[in-house]
Image: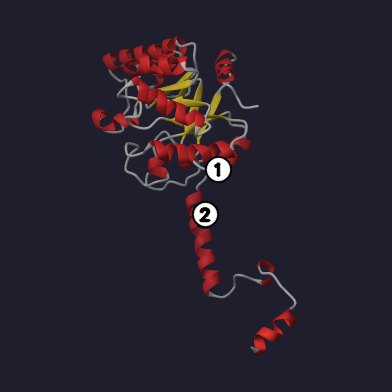
Amino acid sequence: MRVTINEIKEMKAKKEKIVMLTAYDYSTAKLVDEAGIPLILVGDSLGMVMLGYESTIPVTMDEMIHHTKAVVRGAKRALVVGDMPFMTYHTIVSDALRNAARFIQEGGAQAVKLEGGVTVAETVKRIVDCGIPVMGHIGLTPQSIHQLGGYKVQGKTPEVAERLLRDAQALEQAGAFSVVLELVPAPLSRLITQKLRIPTIGIGAGADCDGQVQVVSDLLGLFSDFVPKHAKQYARLAGAIKTALADYVAEVKAGKFPTPEHSSTMDESLLEQLARA
């Protein structure tokens, strides 16, 4: 049985910390799932860490569905959340409903995530009313990076802090089962967490959120372009991979790989006729 949104909400009530991690492919999703992590986000961050885009903005629905299907095949227990890409839920509600449904029907996800607060609350409500669980996302919203003027902490002024609290409450009232707080000052995250009945999941938002989410490529030290301040590298696999690749190149060039151990044999007498031909 997969983890349900009710189980996630109950974790807040029990004061049990919620762990969430991104995944973008079958093999990684399988490892994340086997680690017992209950929430997997197929984030549009795949645009940067998997596809090499400069931001999340170019990511398309087809790309998201492609990766979501792979993650769902790899994860058997975790609740998989599909990240709705830029401008796939901002124009008209019917587009938002259609795209959210694609994540569930085609991608096999169990929920979707939308960026924004008050401005998308009505859309969130309509999606939830159709039976699709929604995770909110406020604070730094990467799809609005040009409007925000860069990857900056959000909520340091009284005006923005008040707006973020209203955004979080609007998402809760609209039926979201949880909300991501990204790059929000820790004291403000604590207040929002206390005010909401639904779980908050932080990324660069302090330890008082009900849960934490990280980009798996940052956590494993795979993405070497830059390391966000909020990310902790629990491994540095980029260096290990480079070493392994260098060893492979050296052994092939030196004729040390493959060895008989990595090859198959046969009755060579069967080749005598071919050799005489």
Q: Residues within 10 Å of mark 1 (few under 14, many from 20)?
A: some
Crowding at mark 2 (Cα within 10 Å: few <14, some 14-19, many 20+): few
Quadrant of image for the N terminus: top right
Residue at 43%, 26% in the rendered image: 100
- Identify the element where label 2 is drawn: helix
Q: Is residue 51 above or below residue 256?
A: above
The residue nearer to you, when weighing 43 against 124, is 124
Q: Position of residue 210 (x, y in %)?
A: 51, 20
**What amino acid is labelled 1 in the image?**
Tyr
Q: CA distance from mark 2 to mark 1?
A: 21 Å
Q: Which residue is mark 1?
A: 26
Asked if one can make out residue 170 in the rendered structure from this viewpoint, the answer is yes
Q: Quadrant of the C terminus?
A: bottom right
Q: How is the image coloured?
A: secondary structure
Q: Which mark is residue 111?
A: none
Would you name the residue on which mark 2 appears? 240
Which amino acid type corresponds to the residue marked 2 in the rendered image? Ala
Q: For this view, does 15 lie left or right of residue 264?
A: left
Judging depth in this view, the residue of 269 and 259 nearest the camera is 269
